[in-house]
């Protein structure tokens, strides 16, 4: 069992930045492909970004491409999501997830077995 914990959410004005972090309780995330998803009120959960086990492959939803960056921080053993140029439509609960059964989980949430509790990101206009 992998317990994931997100941090870094909050309230920010449009055009601002936030950095989300995902850590695993009691273990390193270096052996897992990881992903970030989000769910806005009244909407289905959607893919945001993913990174492969090695970190050599990344993928992004079209809506965040060029603004968000997913990365691994080996020193802190976290997977981070740097979010720049935030828009009100980025407002959502953001979840990190791990995909232990595959090298790269990609945008299919069926590949992800473990999920965090989520962190709220609110972007004001």
Image (cartoon, grey):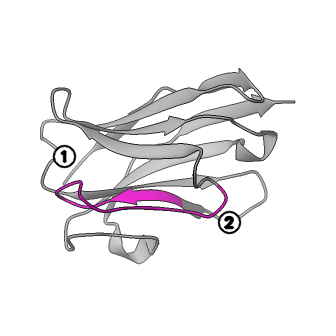
At mark 2, the secondary structure is loop
Relative to 29, residue 50 above or below: below
Cα gap from disc 1 to disc 2, whole angstroms: 26 Å
Report whether residue 24 is seen. no
Q: Measured from the top left, where is residue 91 in percent x and y? A: 72, 41
Q: Quadrant of residue 14?
A: top right
Q: Residue furthest front?
A: 66
Q: Which residues are magenta?
A: 48-63
Tag of residue 44 = 2
Residue drawn at x 46%, y 33% as measured from the top left: 20
In the image, is 54 to the left or to the right of 121?
Answer: left
Tag of residue 29 = 1
Q: Is residue 32 magenta?
A: no
Report whether residue 70 is seen. yes
Of callouts 1 and 2, which one flags the residue occurring earlier in the amino acid sequence?
1
Q: Quadrant of residue 86?
A: top right
Residue drawn at x 71%, y 32% as measured from the top left: 122
Q: Measured from the top left, where is residue 62 in percent x and y? A: 62, 64
In the image, is 25 to the left or to the right of 121?
Answer: left
Q: In terms of depth relative to the viewer, which is nearer, 93 or 105?
A: 105
At mark 1, the secondary structure is loop
In the image, is 49 to the left or to the right of 92?
Answer: left
Q: Is residue 58 magenta?
A: yes
């Amino acid at each position: 069992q992998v317990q994931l914990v997100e941090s870094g959410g909050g309230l920010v004005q449009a055009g601002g930045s936030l950095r989300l972090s995902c850590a695993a309780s009691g273990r390193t995330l270096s052996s897992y492909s990881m992903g970030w998803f989000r769910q806005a009120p009244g909407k289905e959960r959607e893919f945001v970004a993913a990174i492969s086990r090695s970190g050599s492959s990344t993928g992004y939803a079209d809506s965040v491409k060029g603004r968000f960056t997913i990365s691994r921080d080996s020193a802190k053993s976290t997977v981070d999501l740097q979010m720049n140029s935030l828009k009100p439509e980025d407002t959502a609960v953001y979840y990190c997830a791990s995909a232990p059964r595959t090298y790269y989980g990609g945008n299919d949430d069926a590949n992800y077995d473990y999920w965090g509790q989520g962190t709220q990101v609110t972007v004001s206009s």
